[in-house]
Amino acid sequence: MSELLKRSITGFSLVAVMVFAILFHPLAALSLFAVICYFSLYEFYGLMNRYSVITDRYLHSFSGAYLVIIFFIYSMSFFTKWLLLPYFFYLLTLPLTELYKKENASVLNIGLALLGHLYVAMPFALLGWLGYFQPSTYQPILILAIFVNIWANDSGAYIVGSRFGKHRLFERISPKKSWEGFLGGLFMAIAVSSIFAIYIHALTPIEWIGFGIVTSISATYGDLFESFLKRSIGIKDSGNILPGHGGMLDRFDAPLFAIPAVMIYLYFFC
């Protein structure tokens, strides 16, 4: 099977699963993003092993996925304070485990564990809040709109950049990205948001345009930051779980910046 065909099949399947889960039911969306968060964190801690010996990858990854779960449950109004207890226990035991380690104990291990939750788990957890932007009513369209805008941004950037890209956007981090590609992605994101504005009235037309702009810019920075991580370590892909696409972090680097940025935009400006 050619690399292009493998990449296309994986990409189409992933998009189909995501769209179905987001639209079908909040519990389906919760399950999907908890799984994505777990594997993304597992890859992240694998990368961070280049800096320090992280021996509890499974625990850190599961705890991050659990953070996604409790955020969703809180947004669904089924929250009880006891759900926080396991996560608080995890936070309290982080420094204690380093105290009792006989080898490779380091404060850096604690910092990297928490960095993973801030960088990966928190953005996915915020999707629960976006799904319940209007309390008590699950509105999957805002979650879906983020990813559709990111896909449109990626497509526009690739099409325009590969054909007309001459001026490097951030050559030190990502030599292939160009200003022309960035503008092509931004145009596509605005175009998609304009279509949402016509058919979906969760936001005003102007707010939808702002939604597309914020998503495009923040998604680009998310991609650049993950490229920075990989370049600093000297690897091409964060993993190989997705045939033709690399790892989970390679596919979900853009949302890790776009989701918090969109949340801030919606909370303060819409």
Image: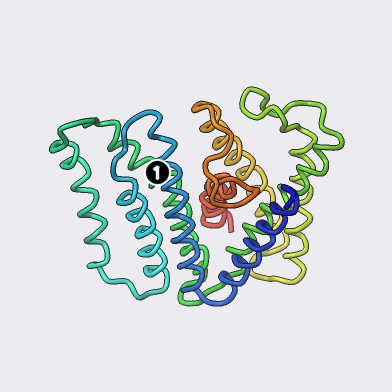
**Picture quarter containing residue 81?**
bottom left
Q: For the point 46% across and 74% down, which residue is it?
A: 27
- Residue at the far front in the pictured view: 1
Q: Nearer the viewer, residue 212 or 48?
A: 48
Asked if residue 218 lies left or right of residue 26, the reply is: right
Q: For the point 50% across and 65% down, which residue is it?
A: 32
State how many labels appear.
1
**Spot occupied by residue 133 in the image (x, y as percentages of width and height):** 51, 67
Asked if residue 160 lies left or right of residue 67, the reply is: right
Whether residue 207 is visible: no
Q: For the point 69% across and 27% down, which residue is it?
A: 175
Please tell me whether residue 142 is drawn above or below residue 165 in the rendered image: below
**Spot occupied by residue 151 in the image (x, y as percentages of width and height):** 69, 53
**Spot occupied by residue 42 in the image (x, y as percentages of width and height):** 41, 47
Q: For the point 51% across and 56% down, which residue is it?
A: 267
**Spot occupied by residue 73 in the image (x, y as percentages of width and height):** 38, 70
Identity, as a three-letter code, of the amino acid under mark 1: Gly
Asked if residue 245 lies left or right of residue 90, the reply is: right
Quadrant containing the C terminus is bottom right
Residue with the mark numbered 1:
116
Q: How crowded is mark 1: few (under 14 residues within 10 Å), some or many (20 or more)?
A: many
Helix or strand or loop: what does disc 1 sit on? Answer: helix
What colour scheme was applied to this rendering of the protein?
rainbow
Asked if residue 258 lies left or right of residue 118, the reply is: right
- Residue at the far left in the pictured view: 100
- Residue at the far right in the pictured view: 163
Whether residue 182 is visible: yes
